[in-house]
Amino acid sequence: MEKKDTSKEIDLSTFKEEVLKAYPSKVAKKRSKAIVYNDPDSRPVIQANVRTIPGIITQRGCTYAGCKGVVLGPSRDILNITHGPIGCGFYSWLTRRNQTRPEGQDDPNFITYAFTTDMHEKNIVFGGEEKLKQAIREAYEIFHPKAIAIFSTCPVGLIGDDVHRVARQMMEEIGNGVIIFGFSCEGYRGVSQSAGHHIANNGLFKNLIGRDDTVEGKFPFRVNLLGEYNIGGDGFAIDDLFKRCGVQLVSTMSGNSTLQKFERAHTADLDLVMCHRSINYVASMLETAYGIPWISVNFIGAHTTVKSLRKIGEYFNDANLKARIEKVIAEEEVKVKKELEKVYPKTKDKLVMLFVGGSRAHHYQMLFNELGMRTITAGYEFGHRDDYEGRRVIPTIQIDADSRNIEEITVTKDPRYRLRKTPEEIEALEKEGLDFDNYEGMMADMTKGTLVIDDISQYEMEKLIEMYHPDIFCAGIKEKYVVQKMGIPLKQLHNYDSGGPYAGFEGAINFYKDIEQIVCCSIWKELKAPWEKDGECIEAEYVG
Ligand code: CFM
């Protein structure tokens, strides 16, 4: 494939019309609402979090993946059992590269295991509850975990197995203070993994948070980091920064987490929300029940890391803390600058396309900006309108049948509720630039006229590549080889391929190096798919 001269202006304006041509009219009408041209000031309405049209090849995963794989999966000492056929458990086993580091050699770490009830036809016909009970007994006998979580896959809901009843019964049968809780996170329950996040958040709040009032840690500035999953060691990089700055991390949800950290999360004084898509519900619940304010942060990108650290300093307003933060920033900025100077002339003006999950397609634009690269189009797999347009649009989002399917729990003030800051203090901090309970969304950070596409289809992705020849495409494993066969390098931004950490300053440096290697590698231009070589061309057309 011929490479375009990237210094030329790129005309994206014909894309939408061009891509919609191929669809039957009803599909085209629906897809047209999910493909919009950005305006960072007015932020156009985008269709998001609605069912994918049957027949379209989507990037999305399922509700079970969002609950088990994403939110609960990274915690190391809760024994997670998948109630379902073998594939669901097996394919959600460690492919996300979420890392963990037990403190002592004898501390439990169940992440390396895949626990599943392995339902067979007999269980589907006659019910799987007995098999689940047996699995719990066996797991307890062998591993003696303090907590067991059960995750429902599609057949569980279809045949009516009651995982919550089994959890209660087994908790009674086993005793010993073990906590057992279930999730109704059947794959079909929502339109994507996003429903699974919400279900998981409710479960965390109902079953774990607030169980232990112990206040521990040597630093007085106590924070939770929500929506950081320690992919490729990102969480470790952030932990390290916090330690150097003197910030006490009470709980990370849920990278490198433990049961105890969840149980003590309510003892923190500030919640930092990184991936708002997957966990904004917990931030709101912690604020309502315990009075912990929250702000959004982003540790993807050196500039945003600086900003996020300074926000923490502002909030606690302690001279010593602020000085430590500034010292760390000054030390790290030297290293970052040195690396950036080496790669910038090579990466500058390269074109990026980013289609990932529910927050990274936004957050990683910050790193690409640092490299002087241009994101001409981006989108989420399962983001909601607020992830694109900003949190303020939430009241205007229509609640459809799929959203009603997810339990809404009512959270009230806990007797331990404690105001961390008076309303006057919050107001003063807001004047200083701290933005509480808010995030601005992807559109605010993308330039005018760039393309924002929700739940991109494979066809649309191919069309983008054909028309604009990006220097790098960022997505996941399902897209990787299709894109690479088109001669465009694909960087996985879910599991980072084999790379990372990419968070914090250390992560930014890693990212600069990895991206420079990828976008400056000339091998991609040589790549020809077999059918291109043989001069064959296979094309099909929809005849509606
Ligand atoms: Fe949040 Fe995530 Fe993401 Fe996500 Fe995910 Fe992920 Fe993701 Mo893959 S929690 S929304 S459900 S940042 S697994 S660590 S990379 S799609 S953009």
Image (spheres, grey):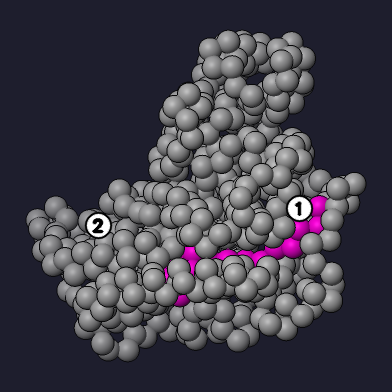
Taking the spot 79% from the left edge, 62% from the top edge, the residue there is: 420
**Residue 299 tag number:** none
Q: Is residue 315 visible?
A: yes
Disc 1 element:
helix
Question: Three-letter amino acid code at disc 2?
Answer: Gln
Taking the spot 36% from the left edge, 48% from the top edge, the residue there is: 477
Taking the spot 12% from the left edge, 62% from the top edge, the residue there is: 523
Q: Is residue 311 above or below residue 222?
A: below
- The residue at which mark 2 appears reads as 484
The residue closer to the viewer here, 86 or 170, is: 170
Upstream in sequence: badge 2 or badge 1: 1
Rendering quarter of residue 354: bottom left
- Residue 390: say if magenta: no
Taking the spot 85% from the left edge, 52% from the top edge, the residue there is: 417
Q: How many marks?
A: 2
Q: Position of residue 333 (x, y in %)?
A: 38, 74
Chain part drawn in magenta: 290-306
The residue closer to the viewer here, 412 or 507, is: 507
Q: Is residue 276 above or below residue 324?
A: above
Disc 2 element:
helix
Query: Crowding near pointer 2: few (<14 within 10 Å), some, many (20+)?
Result: some
- The residue at which mark 1 appears reads as 286
The residue closer to the viewer here, 542 or 233, is: 233
- Residue 293: say if magenta: yes
